[in-house]
Image: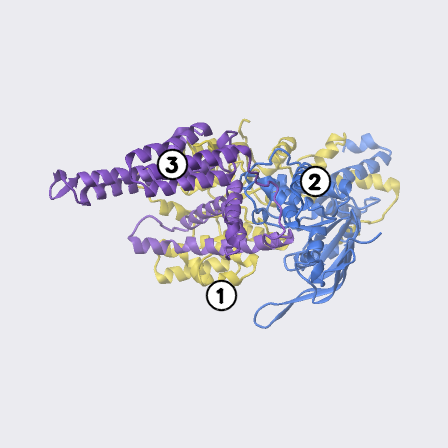
Chain colours: A yellow, B purple, C blue
Amino acid sequence: MTSGLFWAGGRAEVSSTVIEVRNLCHTYMRGTPLARQALKHVTLSIAEGELVAIIGRTGSGKSTLVQHFNGLLRPDSGHVFVDGKDIWQKGVALRDIRRKVGLVFQYPEHQLFEESVASDIAFAPRNMGLSDNAVDDAVREAMRIVDLDYDEFAERSPFELSGGQKRRVAIAGVIAMRPKVLILDEPTAGMDPRGREDVLREIQALHDEHGYTVVLVSHSMEDVARFANRLVVMEDGRIAMDGRPRDVFQRRDELVEMGLGVPQITDLMAELARRGHNFPTDVITVDEASEALLPSLLAASGMAGESDSPCGGGGR
Amino acid sequence: MNFANAAVGQYMPGESLMHRLDPRTKMLVSLGIIIVLFVVSNPLAYALLAVPIVLAIAISGVPVKLVFRSLRPLTFIMVLTFVLHLFMDPGEALFSIGRITATDQGLRLGIVTVVRLTLLVLATSIVTMTTSPIAFTDGLERLLAPFARLGLPAHELAMMMTIALRFIPTLLEETDKIMKAQMARGADFESGNIAKRAKAMIPILVPLFVSAFRRADELAVAMEARCYRGGEGRTRLRELAFSGEDLAVLIVAGAYTVAVAVAL
Amino acid sequence: MKPVVHVENVSYAYDGGNQEQVEALLDVSLKIWPGEFVAVIGHNGSGKSTLAKHMNALLVPTRGNVYVFEMNTQDESWVWEIRQTVGMVFQNPDNQIVATTVEEDVAFGPENLGVEPGEIRRRVDEALALVDMTGYEKSAPHMLSGGQKQRVAIAGVIAMRPRCIVLDEPTAMLDPVGRTEVLRTVRRLASDEGISIVHITHFMNEAVYADRVIVMEEGRIALSGTPREVFSQPATLRKLDLDVPQVTELAGQLQAAGVALSRCPLTVEEMADDIGTLLGRGPCRSELHSH
C-alpha cells in the first residue's frame, strides 16, 4: 500500500504546520512473542485551522498515531514536532505539549472521577498550574462551549448525569486547557442518533466558531463525510490515503476492501456507474446526488407520467 | 506501559505428560513436596526433593529459561533474606565488614532459605505453566469440594477465580487507558513524595472502581440471563478424569516424598 | 402458529430516586413470531432496553403480562425455562463473556442447564460453526475483535438451544466490519435456523433487513411495520430525530420534485434498480446521458 499524498490545497497558504510526524514507527509489547507493529513509517503534517478526520478500522493504528501527537506514546523511531519543536528532545516539557494538543479519549466519560462537574473539568487547568480565578474562568468557558449550563451542572456529581452529558463534561475537561489542537478519538462511539448529532455539531462549532484545529478519529464515514476538510485513511499501520473526502471516496473499492466503505449515497452513484449510467461519481451528500440525478430522471418521468410519492414526499 | 512481564508462571500449552496429568495430581504432588521442603532442613533432602521438580520441568518441554524467569521477581527477597541470615544469625565468625560479622550458622541458614524458596517457586511454576487456568480452577474446586460440607464455598471460590482471570487483561488495559487519559489532562504520577503520589492515584482509582462495578453489574445480569444459579446441578464441558497415569504418578511421587521426609 | 413471545399491554415503572416514578414502558403490546427478524429502534431512554429485558424475565411488568410460549414471566417457577427459550446478547462484548477461553464460555449456558458433557461438546462445536468462529475454541476472549466477541456471545446463547434471541444494541460498540459480521450472523439465524431475532439498534441501515421494524419513543411503540412502511414516513421519523437511509432520503427528495418512482427504495441495489427501470423506460436514453 503506497501512501497517496495528493492533497495539496490549503497548506501552501499562510497556515502553518501545528503537528508533524516524520517516519514514525511504534511496536506494542516489543521483545515479546505478542509484539505487534502498530505504526510503520508514518509521515503526516497537520496545519493550523484544519479539520482532519483520521479513519481506519480497529487496529489500523489510528489511535496509536494520535497518542503520539501529545507525547503519550514514545515512538520507537521517527520524530514528532509540535509547533516545529521536536517533543522528545531534551528540555521539552511534555506537560506543555499536552496542554497545546488536547486529546479526548474514546468513551471519555469513563475517566470522570471528581465529586462535582466543575472540579472534574478543573482537573486539567489546575494541573497546568493556573490560579484559582483562571481555573474558574477556564471551567466556565469550557462548559459554555460544550453547551452545559454552569449554574445547573457545576455542582452536580458527574456520575448522576446522562451518558451524553457525561461525555460533554469529559470533553470540557480537555477544552478547559485551552489547547490549540483538539483530538477526539471516536467521540460518537456508542451514542444514539440524537447524541451523535449533538456531539458532531459541537465539534463542528469548535472548529468553525472557536477556531480549534480539530483531529477527529473515527470509523464512521457518514459522520466525517459531512464536515471534515481532509481525510486520512489508515490501514495496517500506514497511511493509505490522504485527501479531500470527495477524492478519497472515489476510491470506493479500496475502502470497502479495508472494511471502511463510503457513504451510502456515494455507493449509489458508484453502483449506477457500474451499471453503465453516466452520472458523476464524486458525490458525497444526498443534496448533491439529487441535483445530479434530477434532470435526467425528471425527463424520464415525464414520459412515464406517474407522480406517486411512496417515500412520503421527502417529508419536508 | 508494558505488562508482558506480569505474566510470570503463565500457562504454556503443550501435550507432554505434565500437561496431560489431572490438575489435582499436580497440585497434590507439588503441595506434598512443598510441605516436606519446610519440614526438613537437611541439604541431602533438598537435593532429593529437587529431583522430581527437575524431572517435571524436563518432561514438560517448557523452556527451562522461562521456568527460571519466575524466580526473577523474588530475587530481591532472596538476596535480602540471605544477607540478613548471613550477618544476623549467631555462630562462629567467618569474616567481618566493619562492625558486622558473617557467621557460619548464618551462611548455612541463608543458603537453606534460598534453596527452599527457589524449589518452592519452581515447583509451583511448573504446575501453573502446564495447567490451563480452567483446569486449575476446576482442580481447585474439586479438591476443596469435600470442605464444602464444612461451609467452604468451593464452587464460588472457583468461579471467582475464573472471572478474575478472565478480567485481569481487560482491567489492565483499562488502567492503561485511564492513566493515559489523565496524563493527557496534565496528571503527573511520577514526581513528588509518597503522599503526593498516592493522591495522584485517585484520578485513576476512582474511574477504575466505577468501571469495575459497572462491569460486575453487567456481568451478573449476563450470567443470570444464561441461567447461572450457582454450582448445584451444574455440569462441565470437560469433566476432570483421573487416569492410570495420574494414579501412577501420585503413588510414585507420593511414596518418594514421604520416604524423603521420613528418612531424613 | 403460536408467538414465541407475547407482550400484552405491558407497563413498567421504576423508582428513579427522589421518590419519582419513572414510566419506562406504557401499554406496550407486541408478538414475536417463530423465525421472525424484528428490529427495534429508538433513542436512549425510549424504553427499548427495558422492553428487551421483559422478554426473558430479567424484568417483570408492573402491569400487563409477558408470555414466552404459554409461560407467564410473572410465574417465577418458569424463569429458567424462559431464559433458555429466549436468550439475550448485550451491548458491551467484554462484560458478558465469563470464561477464559471461547469454548468454555460457549459451554457456560449448557453447563448451567446441566447438559451432559458429550452433548455440551456437540452444542459448542455446532454453535461456533453457526457464528463462523470454528477454529477459535481455545482463544482467549480479550484477544478477539469486538465483532468476534459478540459472535462468541451469540454462540453462547445458541448453545442453549433458544427459540428466540434478543440482542440489546449488540453493534453499538463495534466498528463497521464488526457490525456487518454481527448483522450477517443474526440474519442467517433467523432465515436458516428459524430462530426469532429481536435486534435492538440505533443504526437505521441495520433495520432495513428486518421483517418488521418497531420504533420506540417515550415508552411507547411510535411506529411499527415493514421497513418500507416505516421508512416511507420520513416526516414522522425526523420528528423523532431518527434518520432514514440516505437512498430513501434521496428517493423522497426526487419524488417531491416530481420524479416517478414506484416504491420507496431502502438499499443501494433497490434504488439503482428503480433508476434503471425509469431510465430504461425513457425513450431518449442516449440523448439524456449526453447532458
**At which x and y percent is residue C122?**
68, 38
- Secondary element under disc 1, as helix, strand or loop, is loop
In the image, what residue occupies the spot 16% across and 42% down? B91
What quarter of the picture does the N terminus of chain B occupy? top left
For mark 3, give the secondary structure: helix
Residue B149 percent across, percent down from the top left: 53, 55
**Closest to the observer: A195 or B239?**
B239
Tell me the chain of label 1: A
**Three-letter code, disc 1:** Arg
Return the chain for callout 2.
C
Viewer-nearest residue: C32 or A47: C32
The amino acid at mark 3 is: Ala
Instruction: Give the number of the disc on residue A156.
Output: 1
Determine the image quadrant of residue A276: top right
Q: Which residue is mark 3?
A: B259
3D distance between C-alphas at marks 2 and 3: 64 Å
Answer left or right for B210 relative to C278: left
Discs 2/3, front: 3
Percent across and percent down for residue C111 are 63, 46
Q: Are marks 1 and 3 in contact (CB under 8 Å)?
A: no
Question: Position of B239 compared to B6: left or right?
Answer: right
Query: Percent x, y for residue C140?
Result: 54, 39
Q: Crowding at label 1, few (<14), some or many (≥20) Cα neighbours within 10 Å?
A: some
Q: Residue furthest bottom?
A: C19
Residue highlighted by disc 2: C184
Q: Amino acid at mark 2?
A: Arg
Disc 3: CA contacts within 10 A as few (<14), some (14-19) or many (>=20):
few
Q: Is residue A101 visible?
A: yes
Mark 2 to mark 1: distance in Å?
43 Å
Mark 2 surroundings: few (<14), some (14-19) or many (≥20) residues within 10 A? some
Taking the spot 45% from the left edge, 30% from the top edge, the residue there is B62
Point out the image quarter for the C terminus of chain B: top left
